[in-house]
Image: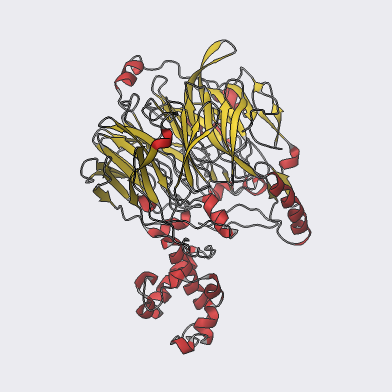
Amino acid sequence: MESDMNGRSYKRVLCATTTAIALTLAGCATSRADAPANAQAASAQDPLANPAPGEWTSDGRDYTAQRFSPLTQINAENVSELGLAWYADLDTYRGVEATPLYADGVLYNTLAWNITTAYDAATGEVLWTYDPRTPREFGRFACCEPVSRGLAMSGNKVIIATLDGRLIALDKDTGAEIWTSRAFPLDTQYAYSITGAPRVFGDKVVVGQSGGDLGVRGFAAAFDVETGEQVWKFFLTPNPDDMPDGEASDSANAMMRATWSDEGMWRQLGGGANPWDAIAYDPELNLVYVGTGNSVPHVRYYRSNDEGDNLFVCSIVALDADSGEYRWHYQMNPGEEWDWTCTASMISADLTIDGEERKVLMQAPKNGFFYVLDRETGEFISAEAHVYQNWNEGFDEDGRPITSAAVRYTETPMLVAPGPGGAHNWFPMAYSPRTGLAYFPAYQSAFVHARQPGWQPQPFRSNSGWGGYTGEAGRIRAELMDEANAVEAAWLAAWDPVRQQLAWKVELPRHGNGGVFVTASDLVFEGTTKQTFSAFDARTGDVLWEYPTQSAPVAGGITYMLDGVQYVAINAGWGGGAAQIERGAGIEMPRASARLLVFRLGGDLVLPPLPEDASSPPEPPRLRASEEVVDRGRQLFQQTCAVCHGQNAIGGVADLRHMDADTHGRFNQIVLEGLYLDKGMASFSDILSEEETNAIHAYVIARANEDWGR
């Protein structure tokens, strides 16, 4: 553990504006003139604002999203007695990123493809399971696996947001559908999906969407929690046709539009800024806070001719909860082009700063800084780097970041820190009002960026515009990547947001350490890439307890009380972006398929041993063909291959979804040259061309990616 941090704290009392027009039209420090008179009383009566001490009924436990539990039965003196009470095999190698929810004796959980289950929270007995039958092709639009980060609750309803854009309210007792709505149409030109948890704020459920690496126009939308009808929608980049949308964002469209070029690929690809994870709420201020994602395409040169701040990419935007109207914004990275997002946890707290009580909003986004903002006005209060970074040269008097010219890359590769994985990604952060510290997994990294000459986007595929992998640029990249690799490190950080300095840290072996929660007995719980679930002393960082989980838990855990017993629950299902990188590098640790693990003091259940040859199935190649080619391959497969290899490429004499890398490499030889004639697979060159064979192969790769890890 360490307790020092080099660098300066930047504190200002004015808000960070992005453009002169932003000040003229709205001003990022423009607050709501009057909150509703009964807001405070309504908040006191709202069970989601003030859940019972033993319940965990929303993603961040309550509207502050502090992930702080008042339970104290499990404490530093007895946490070593924590043992497994029950577990559920989840039958998937996909990442399980959801924070479970708990109310009235029932634990609710959701998996990849939005399969949702209710368990008896004391015994693990399955009460009901709901499968929305999410179309598997939407997995191709999810950059980092078809995950779901959680559920929402309201009264008698559990609400899920599906990968293909549906909001579904279920009866929490039976799992029966109550209503279904849509966040986006299926025939949109954009590669939308939803991986983040929906949030219920009062009488509305608010949701964002994913797809910012492929091409989307980000938005946040609110729906009536009783009926599923849309209440408002706010687009987070300007209308590409310079027309009104007829939505709440119209009043801010001119402000956004002034920060983008007249010509650029943002018009085709949407510009990004999609809120794919955290959305927060202050019921007394009646504000919804939307954390926005990266730009698309990533390269600003192609996106916006290297012009403008490109609102609202990598920003926090405050909206009126009733109408969706714009109230204020703060942009962490004007003109973002490094795949940095501001979608990480946003935590509300009341802090004493320079002798003044401040209502603050805290976030540690990908760019390596910890931010403290005034959540009523958007004023920039302070920010400090918590990892090595080379993009920021300070903040001006209005809190606007001063971006180094050394990270504005061209066709010549440049080293930028942090890397695209981010200094803190989506893994949930926690805050303890007892210790005054925020807790989150930190990742120190760097990456080499360069622009691909003559790049053109491909619909519904990854659209970064990055290049510099060959020739002289490739040589420079290799040298700079050695520097990047030298700074890589990961740890659990305890951060003091008032002093803007590190209180302590615990080194961890690799990127991908999980979400955090903290209790009133000063325990911090986190899943680690050591494939453990661990408890730390919230004041010192001492490791007090570890349990081997056989798969690294990346999700946020919870704690709850039932019949006088405190339980701790965590999904142990390694997956997502960090896992994809690890698998691609061939360094993935052996692991079990995912499980939901539930602990209590004195629990004595034991997991079955991990087999010596345990591993996830071989990961299929990335899909690079267009949707048109995949559709053509689907037709040809059904006409030519399905009789032996199964409808939809499932099963048959050889399940082609499970081909290894060598077999993929020989696919055309097998189909056209009869390489496997001795196994009964004759040549099809008399009826299939090479182009048609490539289309079939693309379809098989698409199906393999859709069903991998099931």
- Please tell me how many numbered marks the rendered image carries: 0
Report whether 552 appears left or right of 172: right
Instruction: Tell me which corner region of the image, top left, top right, bottom left or bottom right, holds residue 180.
Output: top left
Instruction: Tell me which corner region of the image, top left, top right, bottom left or bottom right, holds residue 587.
Output: bottom right
Q: Residue at x 59, y 47 (%)?
A: 510
In the image, residue 434 lies at what x, y percent? Answer: 47, 21
Specify the quadrant that holds the N terminus. Answer: top right
In the image, residue 412 lies at what x, y percent? Answer: 76, 51
Specify the quadrant that holds the C terminus. Answer: bottom left
In the image, residue 418 lies at what x, y percent? Answer: 65, 41
Camera-nearest residue between 53 and 649: 53
From this view, report whether residue 315 is shown above or below residue 554: above
| Residue 687 seen | yes
Residue extending furthest top?
355
From this view, report whether residue 454 is shown above or below residue 487: below
Report whether 55 appears left or right of 586: left
Q: Residue at x 36, y 74 (%)?
A: 646
Camera-nearest residue between 245 and 67: 67
Instruction: Tell me which corner region of the image, top left, top right, bottom left or bottom right, holds residue 406.
Output: top right
| Residue 57 seen | no
In the image, residue 425 lies at what x, y percent? Answer: 54, 41
The colouring scheme, among rainbow, by chain, secondary structure or one colour, is secondary structure
